[in-house]
Image (cartoon, rainbow, N blue to C red):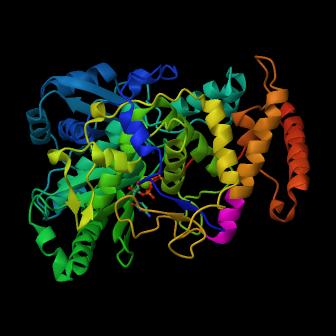
Amino acid sequence: QRHIVRLLSCPGTVAEDLRRDEQPSGSVETGFEDKIPRKRFSEMQNERREQAQRTVLIHCPEKISENKFLKYLSQHGPINNHFFYESFGLYAVVEFCRKESVGSLQNGTQTPNMAMETAIPFRSRFLSLKLKNQTSKQSCIQSSNQLPPSNRKLFELLCYAESIDDQLNTLLKEFQLTEENTKLRYLTCSLIEDIAAAYFPDCVVRPFGSSVNTFGKLGCDLDMFLDLDETRNLSTHKTSGNFLMEFQKILSVIGECLDHFGPGCVGVQKILNARCPLVRFSHQASGFQCDLTTNNKIALTSSELLYIYGALDSRVRALVFGIRCWARAHSLTSSIPGAWITNFSLTMMVIFFLQRRSPPILPTLDSLKTLADAEDKCIIEGNNCTFVHDLNRIKPSGNTETLELLLKEFFEYFGNFGREQNKPDSSPLYIQNPFETSLNISKNVSQSQLQKFVDLAQESAWILQQEDAHRPSVSSNQPWGLAAVLLPSVPNRGSLTKKKRKRSANERVKNLLESLKSNRTANFTETNEK
Ligand code: CTP
Ligand code: MG
C-alpha cells in the first residue's frame, strides 16, 4: 500500500489556479471572515512581540479590587488593556501603552526572591502583588477562560447546530485560540527571552507551530524558537559540522538557567539527542507546556506557510479543527510522542486534500513559489524556502463546496487512501516536509496506526452517509453529523470485514444514542488536547 502526501504540486491544478483571474464567485459565508488575518506573518509576529514587551504578568492575591489594582498600576503609565485568568492562582496580564511603564513598575516593585538572590542579570516582568491592607470586599473579577470547552458543552453545542457546516464552525469557534490566549503565548515567549538574553544578548524567542499557524487549539503546547542569528552569525558555522554540538550546548545552558532561575518554570527536561534538540518545561504561571528549540528556522517558515493556508479560505481552519478533534476523540493522536499521527501531519493531509479539489480550494506550494518576488526569496541551510508572503497577492478560490461535503469527501478520500503513487521509502505513511523535501514528517507512524486512521475514516464516511437519511429536526439532543463521528469506536474493529464493520458501527451508534439519551454524555471521549 502506498500513502503519500505532497504539498508541492498536484499535476493539472497549478496552472489552472494561476490563470484564473476573475474575482471569487462568493466565498462561503460563515461569519468568521472578519477574523481571518490578512496581515503578513512577519508583521503579525512583530506586532505581537512588541505588544508582549510592553506587558507584565502579575500573580495576584485571590481577593483583589480590580479598580484599585488598575489605579495602582496606572501610576506607571496608561494601560492599553488587561485581563485576568486562573492557573493555580489568579493572574493578571497587563499591557501598558508604553514600554517605559514596565521599567517604572519594576523600579517600584520587588522582584520575586529567587531572581533577586541570583547573579543572573535579568529583571523579570513576572511580578507578584502583595496587598498591604487586605481588602475585605469580595472580589468579583472576571476571569478569561484559557481552556477548551468541556465535552458536555461541545456535545450540546454540536447537537443544537443547524447543519454540519454550522457544527464545524461552532467547533472552530470553541477551540481556536482566543485573543487573550494568544497574548499570553507571546508574553510567555517574551518572558523566556528575558532570561535567555542574560546569556545571549539580543537573542529573540519566537513562538512557532500551532500557537501561531492559526491551527492551534486551546490547550496546545507552546513551541518556542531561540533565534540567535541576530546576535552572532551562527549560520556561517553551520557548514563546519560542529554546529549541532554548539546548539546542544546552548540549549543545555538555557535548560540549566530555566531550571534554577526561571520564575515559574518547572519540570525542565533537556532532550538534546533528538534530531532537533530541545528543552521541554512547563511554565506554571501561564499553564503552557513549552518546547524550546534553536536552529529551527525552517519550522518557523513552515508555520508561516500554514498561516497563509489558514488565512486563504475560511473553510480551511474549520475543516482542520474538525479533523484534529475527530482524531483526538478516537485516540489517533496523543499528547505522548509515539507511532501515531501528529496534528501537524493531519493539517498537511487536509491541505493536500483541499489542493486536490476541483477547482482547488488551496493553491499548491509550487504556485505560491511562482507568485514570490525578489523580496520573498529565502534559502535556509541550502533549502529553497521561497514563497509569496503577501496574502493579498494570492487569488481566493472559486470553489464553493460546503464544509459538509468536504468533511464527507475527506473521510472518503483517506478511507480509500494509498492506491496511487510511488513512495520514496518504505514508511507506511509518507508526508513530505514542504521545505526539507527529503524528510518524511510522518516517519514515526506505524502500519497499524495508519490502518486505524484509514478504518476510522471509512467508518466516519459511512456514518455521515447514513446521516443524510435521518438528520433529526432542529432542537434535537441526539448526536448527529459531526457529533456522531466524534463518538468513540469499539475496539478490535480491525479484523471485521467492511460489511460487518458497517453493521457494528450502526449498532454502536444506536447504543451510544441510548446511553446519551439517558444523560451519560461522559461517554463522549476526551477531546481536550492535553
Ligand atoms: N515540525 C516539523 N516536522 C515535524 C514535526 C514538527 O517541521 N516532523 C514543525 C512544524 O512547523 C510544527 C512545529 O514543528 O508546526 C511544532 O511541532 P508540533 O508541536 O509537533 O506540532 P504543532 O503544529 O504545533 O501542533 P500541536 O498543536 O499538536 O502542538
Ligand atoms: Mg505544537
Which residue is at the front of the view, 3 or 342?
3
| Residue 70, horizontal then vertical, whole percent | 25, 23
| Residue 463, horizontal then vertical, whole percent | 79, 40
Which residue is at the front of the view, 94 or 114?
94
| Residue 266, horizontal then vertical, whole percent | 38, 61
Residue 447 located within the stretch drawn in magenta: yes
Q: Residue at x 39, y 75 (%)?
A: 274
Span of residues in magenta: 446-453
Which residue is at the front of the view, 453 or 273?
453
Splitting the image into 4 quarters, where does residue 137 fall?
Answer: top left
In the rendered view, does 451 fall on the left or right side of 166?
right
Residue 344 located within the stretch drawn in magenta: no
Image height of 309 relative to 347, above or below: above
Q: Residue at x 45, y 40 (%)?
A: 362
Splitting the image into 4 quarters, where does residue 385 fall?
Answer: bottom left
Question: As drawn, which residue projects farthest toward the top?
Answer: 474
The answer, for residue 114, to whether it is visible in the render is yes
In this figure, what is the number of numbered marks?
0
Question: As drawn, which residue projects farthest toward the bottom?
Answer: 241
Q: Residue at x 58, y 33 (%)?
A: 171
Image height of 499 relative to 296, above or below: above
